[in-house]
Amino acid sequence: MCNTFLEGVFNRSLNYVTAVVAFMIKILGNEMITKLCAAGHALGWLILGFTTISAEAAQPLQPVELRCEYLANPVGIDVVQPRLSWVLTVKPVNGLGRLFGSRDDSRGREQTAYRILAASSVAKLAADQGDLWDSGEVASDETAQIVYAGVTLTSRQQCFWKVVVWDEHRRKSAWSDVATWEMGLLQPQDWLGSWIGMNLPTPTGDLAANPAPFLRRDFSVRSGIKRARLYASGAGSLELHLNGQKVGGNRERDPGYTDFNKRVLYVTYDVTPLLRPGVTNTIGAILGTGWYDVHDVAVWGFEHASWRGRPRLQLVLVVGYNDGETQVLASDNLWRATSQGPIRSDGIYSGEIYDARREMPGWDEPGFADDSWQAADVLPAPAGKLTALRCPPIAMVKTIIPQAITQPQPGVYVVDMGENFSGHAQLIVHGPAGTKIQLRYGECLATNGMVDRSSISEFMPPPRPFQTDAYICRGSGTETWEQRFSYSGFRYLEVTGFPGQPTLDNFRGRFAHTDLEPAGEFSCSNEGLNQVQRATVQSYLCNAQNIPTDCPTREKNGWTGDAHLAAEAGLMNFHSAAFYTKWLDDLKDNQLADGHIGVIVPTADWGLGDCQPAWDSAYPLIAWDLLEYCGDRRILAEHYDRLRLYVDFLAGQTVNGIIAKTDSLGDWCPWSTETPSQLTATAFFYEDARIVSQAAALLGHAEDAAKYAALAEKTKAGFNAKFFDATNNSYANGSQTALAAALYFGLVSPARQSAVLGNLAQQVETLGHIDAGILGAKWLPAALSAGGRTDAAYLMVAHANQPGWIAMARDSKTLWEQWREPHSRNHIMFGSVSGWFYQWLAGISSDPAQPGFKHIIIQPQPVGDLTWVKAAYDSIRGPIVSNWSRQGGRLTMDITIPPNTTATVYVPAENEMSVTESGRPAAKVPGIKFLGLGRGAAAYAVGSGTYKFSSLVPRCL
Ligand code: BGC
């Protein structure tokens, strides 16, 4: 009570002083104050002093960027106890801090308590009535993964929430802005309608017999609508329309891809603005085959999927009125359907055939005569459980202007989009009715200037259509068209049958991928590495297609190895935790009863039935990444039994602690030296056992923790017994990957650590480049850096020719499948290097002992010819910045540590005497604690805030 009173007096006094200062600034103006200061005038300094003091002392922490289950204001989630998070910021009072261009200098800021209110209406929340949940004041420094613990949430419940926090001085923030989340349909009985579609014959490669059903239904709503939600599930893909407008804006291929026997996704759209009260409304749907009804025959066998069926949908439109009444419209056999629409075929691999002469203007609006349509067929529900999509949707995110057009053969035009991407080509054409235009998509050109797709042929031999569309003109007006249900990976578009001579204006590229929010930025003085960074981001997005894929061009498969190698880069460059959370559910669904996981997930059954730890370890590895990057313990709890089952399965595949299989997938796509796959598989097995042991410890399963730790130790012993070459301090055949695997996973005995590291560094230095595949590409830079040899890692990563990342990125602006002339030019599996940029060149990582960036490690590495690095990472606890530059022998580091976190900052320096922070000896600055000197750096413990360190760079760097 007394505290609160004093706090009030203190804050009010400061506010008063602040107001006076603000008034004087207004009267005098900034320039005048600066002049007064320059002239040594006391008034200027007085105001400036007050400004600084008030800016520091009077700024309570403010919670912003509220999220629920990693998403901003999600609609239609089905996690019944969702997790909430926020980020803390220091708001300058009246903007005073900014007036002098000063930084926010407040440091060591902490949250000591929070209170969350969740209410069923904005009004209740505004009146501070948490009728759903009032957490009360919770003494805690936690800002993420806070589990909702209010009243049991029911279907469609809207939750409005806000949070207030107390800082280290027990000062209270203002309430945050209001955020929301909304529940989806939680009970099977909420789905009042039926699954509907058209009972058409199953296509068997004859594309003409694969029309996409169009469905429609008229209905009316009255006035006084409060909110309307459309809950829609589709097996295959869905495009919904309401009163002539596409539902969901730029979203596409909803609801997403799963093993339809296990889970079928649904999405929730806010359609309130699309309804027209008092008149007839029309809802329409187009059904695509997607991954449910794959008829394209290819090696992966999706055409044999046991879940396969004709496309179908189930939806419920719930209209809530202001007077409390609810109106429901569901999918049933009162819907009308036709197979006579313009989409004559769609295939996820093959492409689409669209006959615009068959368009049905007004089909999705009231008044359309649907007499020739038939009643929709009620179809059986897919076997999987209806589950809400829990990550951002796929969306058409960017329109690309093509760069060039050529005519390599009479009547064949090749459009160069200027970049390799995933999505569609948009065709804009005027042409006589019936003109058939063919579009073929590819990544590169043959010597004759035609689009070269030979690398795809082994998977889908011609004449099977692959990434090929046909558009047949309707013959009136400007016709604009692009694929709806398929997507292609391409840079070049080959066009035949175009009426007349096309120009660039007849085409656009449309980049479509899971709509992930950027989280990181990295750049440095080596332009080659910047190209690699941009290429990684591009390839990562191209391969984010509701699942992490290998390539958008050829396979579109969720290759597990590719996914785990790129996951850390993905988590640093994008807010991708929700995306991986969804895919971990896919991995869980995919696991067989014996613990076994397929190499592609989802799979129809291709790639199942084999022991492939280097790929399947995606399951434990990504679950663990989510703990490290986001502090996500729940994911470990949810998957714990399955992760254990997986490790038990692997244990059953070992002899003397070694994975027995000698030909499992290993260091795929190496440069010239191969590494025995038994070594890499066993290294993964060791890591998997360690993860399960640590997860067990975190979750309180002490017995398991000990059991799996013992298994890991046994594996380590077996690994060293079999592969360690004590004479040469080497492993197996001494390949870069073999040594890096042992170092990266901590398999080397401490006594041999530096000898093995030295051996690896020397190999790299002698060769001057990487000689490894995708596994080595992740482990080598990380292992060298962790051992203090970022100089050798940099030499390898900055190598400008083949084999190297720069050579790939320079040519195609995407990453390749191989170091050499590749089959695919848009694979993400070499993209792990971007994670290394952040973790080592900028030096931003999370302390494993306090995961989710609660304690941050900053350890920049000014190596080689690098003169500067800039990196920012929007962590789950707020933005972290690590910028450094080097001039002569001096290094300057600009660091930002978010409020409520702490950091250990390693400042490269010969000795601590040369280290300053904002011009003062660093060790003497209040709030900065010198921890010691080691490995060419002085270590300091700091709290949150912005710091400018400067040092004399050690001579060895
Ligand atoms: C895929 C890869 C994958 C590999 C493993 C390839 O065809 O494109 O990315 O990891 O096979 O066998």
Image: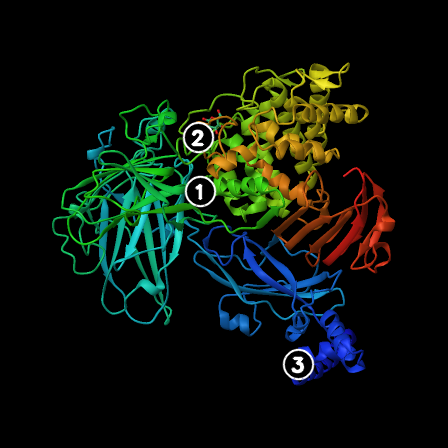
Q: In x, y percent, where is residue 265?
A: 41, 44
**Location of residue 49 by image quarter:** bottom right
Which residue is identified by label 1? 546
Q: What's the mark number on residue 147? A: none
What residue type is disc 2 on? Ser
Q: In x, y percent, where is residue 146?
A: 62, 54
Which residue is identified by label 2? 824
Which residue is identified by label 3? 29
How many tags in the picture? 3
What residue type is disc 1 on? Asn
Please, is residue 442 above or below residue 134 in the view? Answer: above
Asked if disc 3 is less than 8 Å from ligand 1, the answer is: no
Quadrant where the N terminus is found in the figure: bottom right
What residue type is disc 3 on? Gly
Judging depth in this view, the residue of 389 and 919 nearest the camera is 919
Which label's residue is closer to the chain start, 2 or 3?
A: 3
Q: Residue furthest front?
A: 888
Please, is residue 141 above or below residue 24 in the view? Answer: above
